[in-house]
């Protein structure tokens, strides 16, 4: 009787599943209309064509980054014809949106005019070339890229970095303090971080040289997702995430292996070396010698760690790792 009951329950379950499958198979999802069948207007086609070349279009948001942005209140044709016109002045950090884009082939300065709007009542026209030099996309990643692409800032950072690296290297070497590549600790994370920074800087410069359109599109439509971008950008974003993870691991390892004061000195030196790596490889790659320098740097960094940074011994008294034989810095025991 019990077996018959179990069989009945199982048969009912099978009938239930079969009914669900039958009902679901009867459901017909309406096929989405293909983009190829959609009829676009001439204005929409022009907008799509402009976006594919310039990477922005109507309703794109910018922020004014210069001290001021002067817009033409009247139509561009009036200015070209020599008529009297008025101007509208926008100031730094004001938000603007692209309201319209117009091509004027008769303009000898710039055939592309862009109409910007700061609010419902403030509209004005400006040449695209002038606009792009004075605005930045309304996205923190784009703003970061714009800031560190500024020539004057780069020169300032190069000078400051050279001074900082020289100062810290001399100070740390004089104090015989721990420093990556020279008097390293028993951790591969700092060396790996330096190699990642050098590789990322080389890749960053390579993208700008060999795939400028991909980088330009990324500038206007940034993302931190490495799986939604072209392959070369995907590798670059993965290296950025790897730098973040390895940085956390390096800080944690240094904190456990060195006293607080020595750890601060070591991390300061590590930041200086990473800054030097970024500057050297991002600039040298633009002249094609960065690839050779990167290969040499990889061999140098790995050789220095294997020969001088990796712990080869352990203290016979406390078990602490030692880079060389002698007195243990932890317990004071002499290891021969």
Image: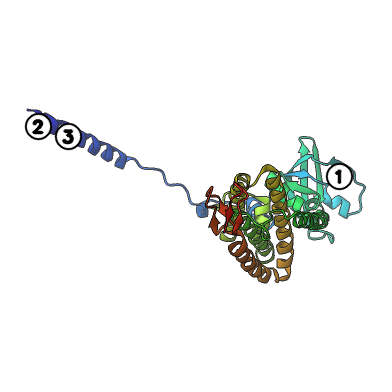
| Image quadrant assignment for residue 169 | bottom right
Would residue 219 be found to the left or right of residue 79 on screen? left
Measured from the top left, where is residue 271 in percent x and y?
Answer: 71, 52
Q: Is residue 314 visible?
A: yes
| Residue at 53% across, 51% down | 38
Measured from the top left, where is residue 68 in percent x and y?
Answer: 86, 44
Name the residue beneath numbered marker 2. Answer: 3
| Residue at 53% across, 49% down | 317
Q: Earlier in the sequence, mark 3 or mark 1?
A: 3
Judge by depth and name the residue closer to the eye, 105 or 280: 280
* Of the two numbered discs 1 and 2 in the rendering, the one whose residue sits closer to the viewer: 2
Name the residue beneath numbered marker 3. Answer: 10
Judge by depth and name the residue closer to the eye, 291 or 265: 265
Judge by depth and name the residue closer to the eye, 257 or 46: 257
Q: Is residue 224 visible?
A: no
Tell me if mark 2 has few (under 14), some (14-19) or many (20+) residues whose alpha carbon lies within 10 angstroms of its own.
few
Instruction: Establish if 243 lies above or below 140.
Output: below
- Distance from label 3 to label 2 (Cα)? 10 Å
Task: Point out which mark residue 67 bears.
Answer: 1
Would residue 287 be found to the left or right of residue 232 on screen? right
Q: Earlier in the sequence, mark 1 or mark 2?
A: 2
Q: Secondary structure at mark 3?
A: helix
- Distance from label 3 to label 1 (Cα)? 77 Å
Q: Secondary structure at mark 1?
A: loop
Q: Secondary structure at mark 2?
A: helix
Tell me if mark 3 has few (under 14), some (14-19) or many (20+) residues whose alpha carbon lies within 10 angstroms of its own.
few
* Of the two numbered discs 3 and 2 in the rendering, the one whose residue sits closer to the viewer: 2
């Amino acid at each position: 009787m019990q077996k018959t009951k179990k069989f009945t329950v199982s048969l009912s379950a099978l009938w239930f599943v079969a009914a669900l499958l039958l009902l679901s198979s009867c459901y017909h999802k309406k096929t989405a209309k293909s983009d190829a069948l959609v009829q676009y207007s001439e204005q929409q086609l022009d907008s799509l064509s402009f976006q594919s070349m310039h990477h922005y279009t109507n309703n794109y948001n910018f922020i004014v980054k210069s001290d001021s942005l002067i817009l033409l209140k009247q139509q561009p044709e009036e200015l070209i014809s020599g008529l009297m016109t008025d101007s509208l002045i926008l100031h730094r950090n004001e938000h603007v949106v692209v309201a319209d884009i117009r091509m004027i082939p008769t303009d000898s300065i710039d055939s592309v005019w862009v109409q910007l709007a700061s609010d419902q009542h403030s509209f004005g026209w400006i040449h695209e070339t002038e606009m792009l030099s004075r605005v930045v996309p309304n996205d923190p990643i784009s703003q970061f890229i714009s800031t560190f692409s500024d020539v004057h800032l780069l020169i300032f950072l190069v000078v400051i970095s050279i001074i900082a690296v020289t100062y810290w290297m001399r100070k740390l070497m004089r104090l015989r303090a721990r420093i990556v590549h020279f008097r390293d600790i028993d951790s591969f994370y700092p060396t790996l971080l330096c190699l990642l920074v050098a590789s990322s800087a080389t890749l960053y410069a390579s993208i700008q040289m060999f795939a400028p359109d991909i980088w330009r599109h990324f500038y206007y439509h940034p993302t931190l997702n490495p799986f939604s971008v072209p392959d070369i950008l995907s590798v670059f974003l993965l290296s950025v995430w790897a730098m973040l993870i390895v940085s956390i691991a390096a800080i944690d390892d240094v904190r456990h292996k060195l006293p607080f004061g020595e750890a601060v000195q070591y991390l300061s030196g590590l930041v200086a070396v990473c800054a030097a790596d970024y500057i050297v490889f991002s600039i040298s790659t633009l002249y094609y010698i960065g690839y050779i320098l990167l290969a040499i740097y990889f061999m140098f960094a790995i050789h220095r760690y294997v020969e001088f940074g990796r712990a080869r011994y352990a203290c016979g008294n406390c078990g602490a790792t030692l880079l060389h034989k002698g007195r243990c810095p932890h317990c004071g025991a002499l290891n021969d």
